[in-house]
Amino acid sequence: MATLSFYFGTMGAGKSTLALQIHHNLGQTGSGILITQHDREADAVSSALGVSASATVIGPDHDLFAIAKEEAAGRGGLDYLVCDEAQFYSPDQVEQLALVVDELDADVHAFGLLTDFRGRLFSGTARLLEVADQRNELQVQSRCWCGELATHNARLIDGNQVYDGEVVLVDDGTTADVTYELRCRKHWMHGTAAPQVERLRSVG
């Protein structure tokens, strides 16, 4: 019986690396699709370790069940989908992934973040937690600058942590310097950067 599995973790937990590994392994004997949205590479799933593979890039208006059904018809069957950056999928798209499992009997492996820079569940993540057959927290532990377990993804604009703004921020070349940093809950809530960074800012 096919299953919908959701794998989640913070930035740096190895989500894309595991997605690429599963896609590689399953592709040796089966037929499947690698899907992404808002990856660091436009038409691929890429890992911070430098590994990447071509992928089907989707947007918010794509019907994932229709894509899977068309692929199944063209290939004579479909065994799996590997979906990276799944936190960006809409709740409707997550339900379409459930249909892929239930109607096409294909396994779906979805990978994503739990919370955004505001500390709130992504809408796609929330729906995945609600409908997935399996929920798997990745055990690779990312660390805050203080050495504690990192639990939150902080958004920094020009070096300062922010808590408001668009969830999906597209760099069009006109925005301020936007970076992300892993922090423990305490330093995320206080917006506290590493002491060395603060000293550099004070003398800058």
Image (cartoon, grey):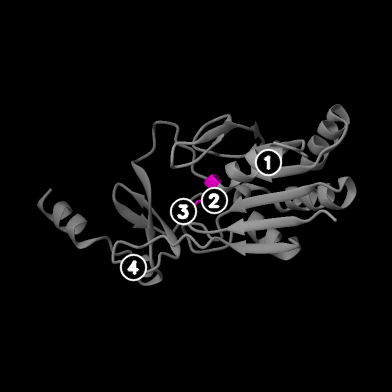
Mark positioned earlier in the residue sequence (3 or 4): 3
User: Where does the image place residue 51, in percent across and percent down from the top left?
Assistant: 49, 36
Q: Nearer the viewer, mark 4 or mark 1?
A: 4
Q: Residue furthest bottom?
A: 186
Q: Residue at x 39, y 33 (%)?
A: 174
Camera sees residue 84: no
- Give the residue type that dot 2 points to: Lys
Residue under numbered circle 1:
60
Q: What is the C-alpha distance between the residues marked 4 and 1?
A: 33 Å
Label annotation for residue 15 = 2
Q: Is residue 138 left or right of residue 164?
A: right
Regarding residue 167, the answer to whether it shows in the image is yes
Q: Where does label 3 land, which residue? A: 11
Front in this rendered view, residue 29 or 12 = 29
Q: Which of marks 1 and 3 precedes in the sequence?
A: 3
Q: Residues within 10 Å of mark 2 (few under 14, many from 20)?
A: many
Residue, disc 4: 187
Q: What distance separates the C-alpha of mark 3 from that of mark 2?
A: 8 Å
For the residues labelled 3 and 1, the Cα–Cα distance comes to: 22 Å
The amino acid on which the numbered mark 4 sits, given as a three-letter code, is: His
Q: Which span of residues is magenta-colored?
A: 11-17
- Give the distance between the C-alpha atoms of the residues marked 3 and 4, in whole angstroms: 16 Å
| Residue 14 % position (x, y) | 50, 51
Residue found at x 66% / y 54%: 124
